[in-house]
Image: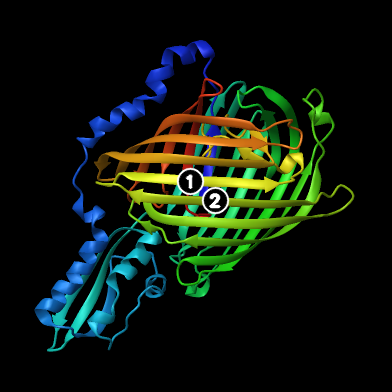
Amino acid sequence: MNVVRVRGMCCSKLTFAIRKFSLVFLGWALIPLTLLAQPNDVKERNIAKNTASAKQAFIDQYGNRLIRNISYAGTKKTRNGVINQWMNAHPGDSLSKFDAVQFLEDLLYLRRFSNINIAYTPVAIHEVDIEVQLQEKWSFFPVPIFWAFNDTRLGGLFVSESNFLGLNKAYLLGGLISNRGYQYIVGYNDPNILFKNFFGRIRSTGGSIFVENALDDGTVIQSYQTQRYDILYSIGQTIGEVFSPTLTGGLYTATLPEDANEGKINPPDGGTSYYQGAKLVFNNTKNRFFYDIGLRLSLEYQHGFAIGGQGVSFDNVQTQNQYTMETFADHTATFALIGAVSNFPTFLEHRLGGLEGTRTLPAFLIPADRYVTTSVTYQIPVKRFKFGTLSSVQFFEIGTYDREVDLQATTFLGPGLGIRFYLKNVTIPAIGFDAGYGLNTQQVQFSLSIGFRPDS
């Protein structure tokens, strides 16, 4: 999932001393209270189980009939081909051959529908009609952004369409402008090319970008203005619904105009590089409307080839691993392990802070060549509305990072809390706000997140 993160300024030490326990540990203290407030939403929590029992109940009453017809109701935009690619039975098959649970899981994973019901109607003497009743989500939405921190003012607009022409294709258009520069993003994602198990993505970002590198306490040690343009792509195949070997590649280019970098702190060199990579993903996660459960593992290797007189080469190995389990009543616990080893030039270094596993660091201010972090996140649905779900998030993380210029690795750790709001009828996964407390820096770091479907 593509995620936009906007960084916030750190509290002063005096302010933090006052808010120390109320901001960070409030979420942990709320756990016993929210346990009492959970709605007993059996439909969502047991949706797969109920789907299996409904089919079995029909067979027990009417017998294992032959399927006469399969139809879909409720779709106004999504084309039948998007649904048909997941249908695992055909007219003439016995009802027992229809794997209703797997079909349901596949449709849920599309995040295209806010409600799914499978109805069975006995017809003739030995036949049955299957009707899949669907309620579509809104797939087109604009997301305005405005944020102010320190001496920076930032605004922008993103427009996302996750069901383009009703074909389950997605695009993202948008840009940000501030008193530090501007940036655009354009992306396209096809999760099932020609309704097959092939997928492809392409994305371009660029603009005049002001970059600051800092220590974990927020002290700025480097700043520069860069003209940065990237084009990234990937294409792969899903095998057995869980394995996805992927070919990745892209072009990075960055220049640092001298006039724009006068007075900046130790600006680095720019450069141009084309990279080619390979990525393997194992993913058996299942969607439960406002959360996913299951295991996702990824490992990617990239090699960058120098282009032109200022070309740069690099090697990068990175991994992202996450397991989410449902504890009870739609509470979830997520365990994550994320890391990378690379020799990137300065302008390409990994950016830490404000993301999964690094939310106690200043958002996007920490560059790293090597890092590893582990985190545990516990999510509790606090209130369900007709249009969405509000949840609280508590997390703890510990990690370490370093760069070629560092004399030693830096360790960070700490707890935090956040809120999430999941819109039931919109394909955007979540809007959230996090506050993480670094035990090593004794500072609170804030970050805002907006999830986008197109590059998930």
Give the amino acid type for the residue marked by disc 2 in the picture. Gln
Residue 318 pos. (x, y %): 62, 51
Q: Is residue 211 visible?
A: yes
Residue 316 pos. (x, y %): 69, 51
Q: Quadrant of residue 267?
A: top right
Q: In the rendered view, does 430 fall on the left or right side of 306?
A: left
Residue at image point 40% right, 22% down = 23
Residue at which label 1 appears: 336
Dot 2 lies on which element?
strand
Q: CA distance from mark 1 to mark 2?
A: 8 Å
The residue sitting at the right extreme is 309
Q: Dot 1: few (<14), some (14–19), or many (≥20) neighbours within 10 Å?
A: many
User: Compared with residue 254, is residue 110 higher up or lower down, i.e. above or below?
Assistant: below
Which mark, by number, is residue 34? none
Q: In the rendered view, does 20 fall on the left or right side of 74?
A: right
Of residues 6 and 245, the one nearer the viewer is 245
Q: In the rendered view, does 144 fall on the left or right side of 259?
A: left
CB under 8 Å between discs 1 and 2: yes
Q: Is residue 291 visible?
A: no
Residue 109 pos. (x, y %): 39, 60
Give the amino acid type for the residue marked by disc 1 in the picture. Ala
The residue sitting at the front extreme is 408
Residue 108 pos. (x, y %): 35, 61
Residue at image point 41% right, 48% down = 429
Residue at which label 2 appears: 320
Residue at image point 20% right, 49% down = 41
Dot 1 lies on which element?
strand
Which mark sits nearer the N-terminus, 1 or 2? 2
